[in-house]
Image (tube, grey):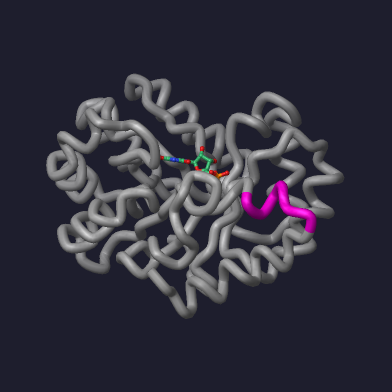
Protein backbone atom coordinates (compact mmCIF):
# COMPACT_ATOMS: atom_id res chain seq x y z
CA UNK A 1 0.00 0.00 0.00
CA UNK A 2 1.20 3.50 -0.80
CA UNK A 3 0.79 5.82 2.16
CA UNK A 4 -1.17 8.89 1.14
CA UNK A 5 0.04 12.23 2.37
CA UNK A 6 -0.37 14.40 -0.70
CA UNK A 7 -2.11 12.21 -3.30
CA UNK A 8 0.66 12.66 -5.85
CA UNK A 9 3.05 10.20 -7.50
CA UNK A 10 5.90 11.42 -9.68
CA UNK A 11 6.25 9.64 -13.06
CA UNK A 12 10.03 9.90 -13.12
CA UNK A 13 10.52 9.35 -16.86
CA UNK A 14 14.10 10.58 -17.23
CA UNK A 15 17.30 9.19 -18.75
CA UNK A 16 19.46 11.03 -16.22
CA UNK A 17 22.29 9.40 -14.30
CA UNK A 18 21.72 8.36 -10.71
CA UNK A 19 23.40 11.39 -9.18
CA UNK A 20 21.29 13.91 -11.09
CA UNK A 21 18.16 11.85 -10.40
CA UNK A 22 18.80 11.84 -6.65
CA UNK A 23 19.43 15.60 -6.55
CA UNK A 24 16.16 16.24 -8.42
CA UNK A 25 14.15 13.89 -6.24
CA UNK A 26 15.53 15.38 -3.01
CA UNK A 27 14.20 18.75 -4.17
CA UNK A 28 10.56 17.59 -4.21
CA UNK A 29 10.45 14.45 -2.08
CA UNK A 30 8.47 16.15 0.69
CA UNK A 31 5.68 16.85 -1.84
CA UNK A 32 5.20 13.42 -3.40
CA UNK A 33 4.09 10.09 -1.99
CA UNK A 34 5.89 7.75 -4.41
CA UNK A 35 8.29 7.73 -7.34
CA UNK A 36 7.32 5.79 -10.45
CA UNK A 37 10.31 4.47 -12.40
CA UNK A 38 10.35 2.23 -15.44
CA UNK A 39 11.81 1.59 -18.84
CA UNK A 40 13.86 4.80 -18.93
CA UNK A 41 15.76 3.76 -15.82
CA UNK A 42 16.06 0.11 -16.86
CA UNK A 43 17.50 1.05 -20.23
CA UNK A 44 19.77 3.85 -19.02
CA UNK A 45 21.00 3.42 -15.46
CA UNK A 46 20.05 -0.27 -15.42
CA UNK A 47 19.21 -2.50 -12.44
CA UNK A 48 22.24 -1.34 -10.42
CA UNK A 49 21.28 2.28 -10.95
CA UNK A 50 17.73 1.52 -9.81
CA UNK A 51 19.14 -0.08 -6.68
CA UNK A 52 21.21 3.05 -6.05
CA UNK A 53 18.07 5.18 -6.40
CA UNK A 54 15.99 3.05 -4.07
CA UNK A 55 18.81 3.03 -1.51
CA UNK A 56 19.47 6.77 -1.85
CA UNK A 57 15.90 8.05 -1.52
CA UNK A 58 13.57 6.99 1.24
CA UNK A 59 10.20 6.65 -0.47
CA UNK A 60 7.85 4.16 -2.11
CA UNK A 61 9.18 3.09 -5.52
CA UNK A 62 6.67 1.93 -8.11
CA UNK A 63 8.01 0.08 -11.17
CA UNK A 64 5.95 0.82 -14.25
CA UNK A 65 7.09 -1.81 -16.72
CA UNK A 66 3.51 -2.89 -17.47
CA UNK A 67 4.53 -6.46 -16.89
CA UNK A 68 2.49 -8.96 -18.89
CA UNK A 69 4.14 -12.28 -19.63
CA UNK A 70 3.51 -15.91 -18.77
CA UNK A 71 3.51 -16.84 -15.10
CA UNK A 72 7.07 -17.95 -14.51
CA UNK A 73 8.60 -14.92 -16.23
CA UNK A 74 6.24 -12.62 -14.32
CA UNK A 75 7.34 -14.26 -11.09
CA UNK A 76 11.05 -13.91 -11.92
CA UNK A 77 10.59 -10.22 -12.69
CA UNK A 78 8.71 -9.59 -9.43
CA UNK A 79 11.43 -11.28 -7.37
CA UNK A 80 14.16 -9.35 -9.15
CA UNK A 81 12.38 -6.01 -8.77
CA UNK A 82 11.94 -6.73 -5.06
CA UNK A 83 15.72 -7.28 -4.80
CA UNK A 84 16.24 -3.87 -6.40
CA UNK A 85 14.21 -2.17 -3.66
CA UNK A 86 10.99 -1.77 -5.63
CA UNK A 87 7.80 -1.64 -3.53
CA UNK A 88 5.09 -1.92 -6.17
CA UNK A 89 4.71 -3.04 -9.79
CA UNK A 90 2.23 -2.17 -12.54
CA UNK A 91 1.04 -5.21 -14.47
CA UNK A 92 -1.18 -5.64 -17.52
CA UNK A 93 -4.55 -7.21 -16.75
CA UNK A 94 -4.87 -8.44 -20.33
CA UNK A 95 -2.66 -11.51 -19.80
CA UNK A 96 -5.47 -13.02 -17.76
CA UNK A 97 -6.03 -15.07 -14.65
CA UNK A 98 -3.68 -17.96 -15.39
CA UNK A 99 -0.67 -15.68 -15.80
CA UNK A 100 -1.56 -13.48 -12.82
CA UNK A 101 -2.66 -15.91 -10.12
CA UNK A 102 0.79 -17.13 -9.07
CA UNK A 103 2.36 -13.71 -9.23
CA UNK A 104 -0.41 -12.20 -7.10
CA UNK A 105 0.26 -14.75 -4.38
CA UNK A 106 4.04 -14.33 -4.69
CA UNK A 107 3.73 -10.56 -4.41
CA UNK A 108 1.79 -10.89 -1.15
CA UNK A 109 4.45 -13.27 0.21
CA UNK A 110 7.25 -10.88 -0.78
CA UNK A 111 5.42 -7.77 0.40
CA UNK A 112 5.42 -6.11 -3.01
CA UNK A 113 2.22 -4.50 -4.33
CA UNK A 114 0.67 -5.22 -7.69
CA UNK A 115 -1.35 -2.52 -9.42
CA UNK A 116 -3.32 -3.83 -12.35
CA UNK A 117 -3.62 -1.72 -15.50
CA UNK A 118 -7.25 -1.97 -16.59
CA UNK A 119 -7.72 1.11 -18.78
CA UNK A 120 -5.28 3.42 -20.53
CA UNK A 121 -5.03 7.19 -20.63
CA UNK A 122 -4.82 7.02 -24.42
CA UNK A 123 -6.21 4.26 -26.63
CA UNK A 124 -6.74 1.02 -24.76
CA UNK A 125 -10.15 0.39 -26.31
CA UNK A 126 -9.92 -3.38 -25.76
CA UNK A 127 -9.46 -2.67 -22.07
CA UNK A 128 -12.46 -0.37 -21.93
CA UNK A 129 -14.67 -2.97 -23.61
CA UNK A 130 -13.77 -5.42 -20.83
CA UNK A 131 -13.60 -3.10 -17.84
CA UNK A 132 -15.93 -4.96 -15.47
CA UNK A 133 -14.26 -8.30 -16.20
CA UNK A 134 -10.78 -6.93 -15.45
CA UNK A 135 -11.85 -5.16 -12.25
CA UNK A 136 -13.47 -8.36 -10.99
CA UNK A 137 -10.35 -10.33 -11.95
CA UNK A 138 -8.19 -7.94 -9.92
CA UNK A 139 -10.40 -8.18 -6.84
CA UNK A 140 -10.37 -11.97 -7.04
CA UNK A 141 -6.58 -12.07 -7.36
CA UNK A 142 -6.07 -10.00 -4.20
CA UNK A 143 -3.91 -7.21 -5.54
CA UNK A 144 -3.19 -3.76 -4.06
CA UNK A 145 -5.02 -1.66 -6.60
CA UNK A 146 -5.63 -0.51 -10.14
CA UNK A 147 -4.29 2.02 -12.65
CA UNK A 148 -7.14 4.12 -14.03
CA UNK A 149 -6.86 7.02 -16.51
CA UNK A 150 -7.21 10.67 -15.52
CA UNK A 151 -8.38 11.29 -19.09
CA UNK A 152 -11.45 9.07 -18.53
CA UNK A 153 -13.04 10.19 -15.22
CA UNK A 154 -16.15 8.12 -15.85
CA UNK A 155 -13.94 5.02 -15.71
CA UNK A 156 -12.40 6.15 -12.42
CA UNK A 157 -15.89 6.60 -10.97
CA UNK A 158 -17.03 3.21 -12.27
CA UNK A 159 -14.00 1.38 -10.85
CA UNK A 160 -14.31 3.13 -7.49
CA UNK A 161 -17.98 2.21 -7.30
CA UNK A 162 -17.07 -1.42 -8.00
CA UNK A 163 -14.14 -1.84 -5.59
CA UNK A 164 -15.14 0.37 -2.64
CA UNK A 165 -12.28 1.60 -0.51
CA UNK A 166 -10.30 -1.62 -0.33
CA UNK A 167 -8.11 -0.91 -3.36
CA UNK A 168 -5.87 1.99 -4.26
CA UNK A 169 -6.55 3.71 -7.57
CA UNK A 170 -3.58 5.39 -9.26
CA UNK A 171 -4.32 7.76 -12.09
CA UNK A 172 -1.94 8.86 -14.87
CA UNK A 173 -2.74 11.22 -17.71
CA UNK A 174 -2.72 14.49 -15.74
CA UNK A 175 -1.22 17.56 -17.39
CA UNK A 176 0.39 16.95 -20.78
CA UNK A 177 -2.13 14.22 -21.68
CA UNK A 178 -5.06 16.49 -20.89
CA UNK A 179 -6.29 15.46 -17.44
CA UNK A 180 -6.87 18.50 -15.22
CA UNK A 181 -4.90 18.40 -11.94
CA UNK A 182 -7.17 17.52 -9.05
CA UNK A 183 -9.92 16.00 -11.19
CA UNK A 184 -8.80 12.36 -11.09
CA UNK A 185 -8.71 12.37 -7.30
CA UNK A 186 -12.02 14.27 -7.28
CA UNK A 187 -13.43 11.41 -9.38
CA UNK A 188 -12.32 8.76 -6.90
CA UNK A 189 -8.60 8.09 -7.49
CA UNK A 190 -6.29 7.99 -4.47
CA UNK A 191 -3.26 9.32 -6.33
CA UNK A 192 -2.61 11.35 -9.45
CA UNK A 193 0.51 10.34 -11.38
CA UNK A 194 2.30 13.26 -13.04
CA UNK A 195 5.46 13.20 -15.13
CA UNK A 196 6.33 15.69 -17.83
CA UNK A 197 4.41 18.66 -16.36
CA UNK A 198 6.77 18.49 -13.38
CA UNK A 199 9.98 17.12 -14.89
CA UNK A 200 10.11 19.44 -17.89
CA UNK A 201 9.19 22.52 -15.93
CA UNK A 202 11.62 25.35 -15.15
CA UNK A 203 10.42 25.26 -11.56
CA UNK A 204 9.40 21.70 -10.68
CA UNK A 205 8.75 22.52 -7.04
CA UNK A 206 6.31 25.32 -7.83
CA UNK A 207 4.46 23.20 -10.42
CA UNK A 208 4.24 20.36 -7.91
CA UNK A 209 2.86 22.73 -5.27
CA UNK A 210 0.23 24.01 -7.70
CA UNK A 211 -0.82 20.41 -8.51
CA UNK A 212 -1.11 19.73 -4.78
CA UNK A 213 -3.37 22.72 -4.28
CA UNK A 214 -5.57 21.49 -7.16
CA UNK A 215 -5.75 18.07 -5.48
CA UNK A 216 -6.76 19.73 -2.19
CA UNK A 217 -9.23 22.10 -3.78
CA UNK A 218 -10.34 20.67 -7.13
CA UNK A 219 -12.16 22.73 -9.75
CA UNK A 220 -13.41 20.21 -12.29
O1 LIG B 1 -2.61 4.43 -19.18
C1 LIG B 1 -1.52 4.82 -18.80
N1 LIG B 1 -1.06 6.03 -19.17
C2 LIG B 1 0.15 6.53 -18.76
O2 LIG B 1 0.50 7.65 -19.14
C3 LIG B 1 -0.72 4.05 -17.93
C4 LIG B 1 0.50 4.54 -17.47
N2 LIG B 1 1.23 3.80 -16.64
N3 LIG B 1 0.93 5.77 -17.90
C5 LIG B 1 2.24 6.28 -17.41
O3 LIG B 1 2.03 7.47 -16.68
C6 LIG B 1 3.23 6.62 -18.52
O4 LIG B 1 4.02 5.49 -18.81
C7 LIG B 1 4.03 7.76 -17.91
O5 LIG B 1 5.07 7.23 -17.11
C8 LIG B 1 3.04 8.44 -16.96
C9 LIG B 1 2.41 9.69 -17.52
O6 LIG B 1 3.38 10.66 -17.73
P1 LIG B 1 3.04 12.18 -18.17
O7 LIG B 1 2.06 12.13 -19.29
O8 LIG B 1 2.47 12.84 -16.93
O9 LIG B 1 4.36 12.71 -18.56
Q: Is residue 88 left or right of residue 197?
A: left
Residue drawn at 26 percent across, 65 percent down: 166
Can you say whether 68 is above or below 103 in the image? Answer: above
Q: Position of residue 27 (x, y in %)?
A: 79, 63
Q: Which x, y percent locates residue 60?
A: 58, 57
Q: Is residue 132 shown above or below 164?
A: above
The quarter of the picture where the C terminus appears is bottom left
Tell whether position 199 is magenta.
Answer: yes
Q: Is residue 22 above or below residue 123?
A: below
Horizontal side, residue 169 vs residue 33: left or right: left
Task: Judge by depth and name the residue closer to the eye, 40 or 51.
Answer: 40
Residues in magenta, as a range = 197-202
Q: Quadrant of residue 127?
A: top left
Q: Nearer the viewer, residue 111 or 36?
A: 36
Image quadrant occupied by the N terminus: bottom left
Q: How many marks?
A: 0
Q: In the displayed image of the protein, which residue is found farthest to the bottom?
A: 217
Whether residue 140 sits left or right of residue 56 in the image: it is: left
Between 60 and 6, the one nearer to me in the picture: 6
The residue at 35%/57% (across/down) is: 169
Location of residue 81 (image quadrant): top right
The x, y position of residue 186, in whole percent, is: 36, 70
Rendered location of residue 125, percent (x, y): 25, 31
Q: Nearer the viewer, residue 148 or 29?
A: 148
**Residue at 53% over, 50% down:** 87
Q: Residue at position x 55%, y 53% from top?
A: 194
Using the rendered view, name the quadrant where residue 97 is placed: top left
Amino acid sequence: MIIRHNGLILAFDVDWDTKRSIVFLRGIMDLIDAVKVGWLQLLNIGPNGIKELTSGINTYFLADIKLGDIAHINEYVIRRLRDLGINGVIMHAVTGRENLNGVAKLSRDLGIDIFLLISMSSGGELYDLNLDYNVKLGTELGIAGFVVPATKPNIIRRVRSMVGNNYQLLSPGVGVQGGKPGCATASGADFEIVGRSIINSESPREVTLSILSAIKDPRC
